[in-house]
Image (tube, grey):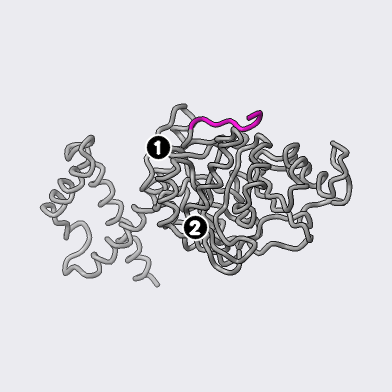
Amino acid sequence: MSKAAQLDRDAVRIGDLVIGDGLPVVVIGGRDARWLRLRGDGGTPGDGAETLRDMPGDSTEDGPSGDGSPWNGAAAGAGARRAGPLLVEPATAADLPAVARHADGVVIGAAWAADPDLVRAAARLGLPVVIQRGIDRHGRVATLEEWLAAVDDCAAEGNEAVVLCESGGRGEPEDAAPDLGLLRAARERAGRPVLAGLGGDGGLADAAVAAGADGLLVGPSAPARTLAAAHEAATVMAALVRPDDPETLDAARAAIDRVDAALATLIERRAALAGRIQRLKPVGGFRGRDMERERRLVEAMARRAPGLGARLLAPIMNAVIEAGLRLSEETRDGEDRR
């Protein structure tokens, strides 16, 4: 493995991006990494991944290697412009030499995953490998056993830097709906990082993260709302359900930023609910505070946060409650003035 840097079975490095358990949820196709999906017929793939025709410049020019590959220059340009690593899904085995020169990782599409010869050829590039599960070239949906067999094929070539990607089994790539139960089973069986392919539906992003996805695969041409939902899930939902184990100061601060984003979201929601309560109570505002209920609330929270305990939680919750009451009064005053 010349380029494939495997940290361990459950953490794989692709360029400067590390994917795995206990690490931040990544968004591939967003700001964390780019995905270039080649098409032998030059057509536009339904899953929204960039294609040769999406790249600027004359795609018929040879790349720096001069090997005559019709997309070599475009792939090199994609690598030069990217903010994060570049993953490339080749259309045929003929694309593999250029993938090895310009990509940080190779994506084995669902159509390839059932062909052990092609899987092994990709693994021999020495790049980290992302193996998608979905519909093969014969219209079949790959089983879990077939998906994991492709992992074994990579390992047989000495490449252990493997990431699984669950993309579902619907008829069209843009309608991809990952099987989250299968995603979880693959993670447990293989002990390797698992991505969820969202297709164009960002509504599954939160559920995928909650199910244990280490990353979300979103094509750059997917709707902006899909990409926004993926990043929101990787920030807020991940902070709620995914323990972090940062080893550097920057990583620890980034983890705190994600927790703070989740806190802000929940505090805003709490304030809205508190405002509703103020409108329902016979006596609202500061005069209507129920101190006994607040004491019970703090005690209940202390059971979930034993490290802080009731003594440290009490002033925090007092500040949160008072902020909500002030917001409710300001909102009511504004409505009265109108």
Q: Toward the viewer: 218 or 338?
A: 218
Q: Which tag, 2 or 1, sits closer to the chain's start?
A: 2
Q: Tell me where residue 267 appears, x and y as whole percent.
A: 34, 52
Residue 237 seen anywhere in this rendered image of the structure: no
Task: Name the residue carrying label 2.
Answer: 143
22 versus 270 height, above or below: above
In the visual, does 29 lie left or right of 76?
A: left
**Pointer 1: residues within 10 angstroms few (<14), some, or many (20+)?**
some
**Magenta-span inclusion, residue 3:** yes
41 versus 69 height, above or below: below
Q: Tell me where residue 305 appears, x and y as whole percent.
A: 23, 41
Q: Quadrant of residue 76?
A: top right
Residue at the limit of the structure toward the bottom, as seen here: 338
Q: Residue at x 84, y 51 (%)?
A: 59
Give amino acid for label 1. Asp
The magenta span reads: 1-8
Residue at the limit of the structure toward the left, as seen here: 292
**Pointer 2: residues within 10 angstroms few (<14), some, or many (20+)?**
some
Task: Name the residue carrying label 1.
Answer: 244
